[in-house]
Image: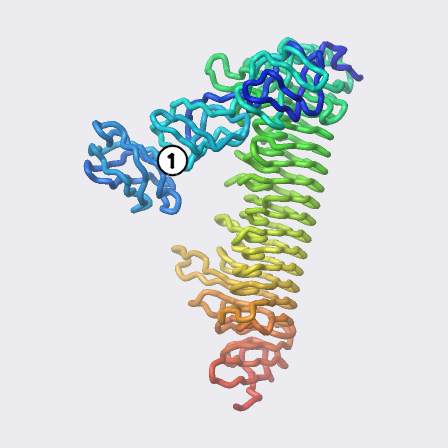
Amino acid sequence: MQFDAEAHGIPAAGRSLTQVEVAAGASTVTVLDGSVLDGDIGKQISIPGAADMSATLAGFPQSRRIEHAAIQAGHNDLTFTLPAGVGSFRANIHDGWRIVVEGAGPGGGPLITTVDHVVQPTSDLRLEADAAVGVPDTTAFLNPPDEVLLDDHARATVGPLTVQLGDRTIADGFMTVGSKKLTSASAGFSAADLTQTVVIRGAGHLVTSITGTSPDGAVSIAQPAARTVHDGIAEVWDPSADALPGFLELLDLIRTTGTGPAEIVFAPGVYDFSRTPQQPGSMPAAIGLEGLTGLTLRGAGPGVTFLRLMPEQDLRHPDTGTVMDTHVVMARDCTQLSIRDLSVHAAYLSMRRSVEQMHGIVIAAGCQDTLIADVGVVHSAGDAVRMLGEPASPVRGVHVERCQLIRAKRSGIAVQRSVRTAWIRDCRIEMSPPSTGSCLDFEPSGNGAPEDFVIESNSLLHATAAKAVSLSGTGAGPPTRRIRFSGNVLDGGGVGGVNGREVTITGNVVTAGDDHGMTLDGFDDLTISDNRISVPAPERTGIALVRRPNVASTRVRIIGNQLDVSGAGIDISSGGDHLDVSANRIQATGAAVGIRLRLVGAAVHRDIRITHNSVTDFAQAGIRLTADLPPSTSSNPLPTVTVSGVDISGNYLHVDTPAPAPSLAGISLEGPAIQPNWLEQVFVSGNLIGESIPRKLDRGVLTIAIGGNPGAATIYQGVSSPVGAVVAPPGSLFIQTPGGTELTRTFVKVSGTDANGWLQVTIP
């Protein structure tokens, strides 16, 4: 059954204006797109950037605290002992941090100074100033000197600007829209500054009323703007036209009448929803959907129909005063829910306060068969779309299709804990400031991790410091499983992840910006194929597999990728068994290594294939295969490592450098020095190694097969004599190339299947 929203007392009285301009001191606002209505007179208007912001210094993005420290009067060495498990200090990070040492300043007050140098990472910091008073047991607080967090977020990007901070003036302050971070290279922020109030010019939002309109696309406002705004936005609303009461009544009607599949249709317009009071068991959302089956929320199209969190709400808890988590739409224990053809507008730039747990759409525990299609999500203080399941009540069967998720403050799509079976298709996700997170972020925790995801044909635009795409399982628990990431176009960031199984990444176009192309930590049964990866930033890797403790990547296939890199092309430092790196094209610009496989953590590694790759313009080696001894234990104090079944064939390795370094190698095989025979059943043949590469094959004292099958009659090459050392069937040949001034010798295997029966057939 279909229900018309406005016919059931759900008004569309809001407006969302774009291309807004107002001059400082003016009471006339120009709306350049001409969308001004006489019906807006008397409504409230919020104009981000048209007012100053008063806020309190509340904390730091990074900080360290030291307990039970000591310092002597007249000295500048702060000594301490870090507890077990607490990260040590590092000179390249903590030198230059501000520090406040309680009781060590003049008259027993705080000593406010800077860390001159990390002397001992776990026990000694040298400070720039001496202590005025010695303290044997005190607390110190450290933080970077150039950034501090305020208790409110900027409604516009501002700076450089002058900020008065206590008794000093900062002339190079800067804030990004949506962020609570105030940066200043000269400020020298410290813990002593916390709780001070600052005024940030132009970072607030003007809240006033509309007193008139004009045919030329202007509105008059009751209070003049304090600051000039060019090409801005404005939110217009009627506080008395709350859509929530009518919506709740309609939901009750649907429940009590037992109406079958129900569709609530929203006409073009902006529907403003207030936050329900915080009560035990209530949902932290303006639109809370719980225990519903077959409900559809449908609009007239994204950008035409808006479900908006009503601006200028005071979302503080009435008892604690903290800002409440407030999502626009949240569903829990719903089945066959559809949200389509509309925009979800979180309006966080026009809220009195916001927190990061204020998401656009949340699909929570117990939801099954959810469709989010042709939906836009804008101005979210948290994630645009969030899926949040629980192990005992997972989220199952979510389709997110043809959606536009634009500049959410945190992430575009976030997936946490137990979410099973989801499709994310044909979406446009843009993450640039004020965004700080990922386009797509798996955030597993506890005992649940995402499984069975298809993520395909999406356009992802990324411009934050976070990974653009994170496909992760829990840190120490269940992995993410059965994930397919295919056919996506990713611009400005890389793909990362921790703890994955049965993952396929194929057919994507990745331009990584300042990041690595793909960095996967602790992945097993992984396929990376047919991707086009461009990594322009210096010393960044195209594809990297990193080892997690006790997890070596096995059953890995890296096939048919095209990589343009300035760092390493393919770097696998987590190798176990069954590794296939084939048919990749790596164009490097001074990369250290084209393809590097480092086998660690096990006594035996089997089935390694590096075949038919093209690697150009590397700096140290085109292909490097290394193996490390596993750690010794009480039961195995002298461990060994064996790599068995290696095929390095058909590769094209070339450099354009006219005079490369003498150490440059085409193929390098490097095992433990104390175990020269770490490789067995190794086949190196048919590689085209450029004439300008000085060292075609670095292999130490290894014997390798260069033709045939090591299980049948084979051609071998080695440094030492094969007699008593090389097991081969009759008919095999051995070419001894000792190097230096020694002459090459040739042997033929005339009898037996052991290491004897070799006959030297060339005489020097």
Q: Which residue is mark 1?
A: 143
Q: At which x and y percent is residue 365? A: 61, 26
Q: At which x and y percent is residue 624? A: 54, 63
Residue 399 in view (yes/no): no
Residue 361, located in which quarter of the rendered image? top right
Residue 131 in view (yes/no): yes
Left or right: residue 257 versus residue 711 is: right
The quadrant of the image that shows the N terminus is: top right
Q: Neighbour class for label 1 at 10 Å: few (<14), some, many (≥20)?
A: many
Q: At which x and y percent is residue 158? A: 51, 30
Q: Nearer the viewer, residue 587 or 385?
A: 587
**Residue depicted at x 64% and y 30%:** 395
Color encoding of the figure? rainbow
Residue 717, located in which quarter of the rendered image? bottom right
Q: At which x and y percent is residue 416? A: 58, 33
Q: Nearer the viewer, residue 724 or 530?
A: 530
Amino acid on which disc 1 is placed: Asn
Q: Nearer the viewer, residue 356 or 211?
A: 211
Residue 302, located in which quarter of the rendered image? top right
**Residue depicted at x 57% and y 45%:** 496
Left or right: residue 216 versus residue 604 is: right
Rendered position, 63 above or below 506: above
